[in-house]
Image (tube, rainbow, N blue to C red):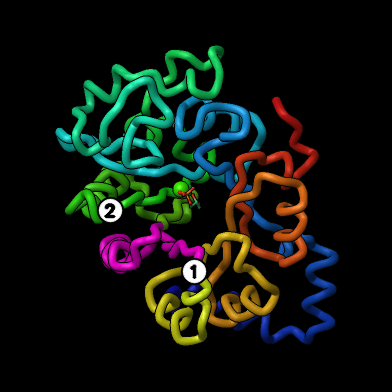
Amino acid sequence: MKKTLLGAGIAFTLLLSPFQQAFAAETTGELRKFDNVAHRGASGYAPENTIAAFDKARAMKADYIEIDVQRSKDGKLVVIHDTSVNRTTDGTGYVKDLTYEQLQSLDAGSFKGEQFSGEKIPSFEEVLDRYRGKIGILIELKAPELYPGIEEEVAQELRERNMDKPQDNKIIIQSFNFETMKKMNALLPKIPMGVLTSSKAHTTDQALEEFATYADYFNPSYGIVSKELVDKVHALGMKISSWTVRSHEAAQFLIDMKVDAIITDYPDYVDPRMGVK
Ligand code: G3P
Ligand code: CA
């Protein structure tokens, strides 16, 4: 188990009888609370990975925004999902082959609707400065194998802002690249780390035990989630966040599975009280 505090929490919970655990859950509601994570911002309602989508997530009172971090040709960390700009902007080419100035000149909003025209690809710095302390940030290192050294650069941006202390800022880092996550855990030991997968091969006891040596979260696509998997992940002292909810049925399924966080394009599908603001 990676984190002492997490271990202590579990040890405390295990001291309770099953009846007491159920009672605590029913009466406090806390043990069953899950985080509502706006995937690439509230991307069902605004262009993904833009300030418009992140502001929308805040307005909807999501607990976290999820962002994808990559790097421009001239070394600036930027927030965009695909490794090329083709789908979400009016430009073409790979993120890694375009300078920050070139990326900034692109329209990253119109693909979602004309009312969003003029939205820009945000820089990582801009997102940290605008949202730190206001909403949690789930930072995904997207395709880090394309960006040698990006782990240290992300760590440095967080350290410079004193955001490497989890008690003050809700920050979690995740990636599909497990070697990157091991590096991140060594660089920022106090920040919770997550491993992303959609592969059942990563849900064996052996694989999960290995993840638990450096990760705090096991974050699978919802198609491979089961109650058994949730229990196994919890027994190893990790939490489980699942993605990507784009229907009411998927939201209900993950609520029933009692995952710790639900990553969704539509925060109101997970909590209907939110409404679309
Ligand atoms: O946060 C989970 C999710 O973002 C992983 O998939 O492709 O949307 O980055 P993707
Ligand atoms: Ca992502």
Of 112 and 159, the residue lying toward us? 112
Image position of 243 (left or right of 249): left
Q: Is residue 31 above or below residue 44?
A: below
User: What is the x, y in percent for residue 10?
Assistant: 60, 78
The kind of residue tagged 2 is Pro
> Would you name the residue on which mark 2 appears?
144
Question: Quadrant location of residue 106?
Answer: top left
Regarding mark 2 in the picture, which secondary structure is present there?
Answer: helix
Q: Which label number is shown at residue 199?
A: 1
User: What is the x, y in percent for residue 250?
Assistant: 71, 54
User: What is the x, y in percent for residue 150?
Assistant: 23, 50
Q: Residue at x 46, y 34 (%)?
A: 49
Q: Earlier in the sequence, mark 2 or mark 1?
A: 2
Q: Is mark 1 within 8 Å of ligand 1?
A: no
Whether residue 79 is visible to the viewer of this picture, yes or no, is: yes
Q: Which residues are magenta?
A: 175-199
Image position of 109 (left or right of 97): right
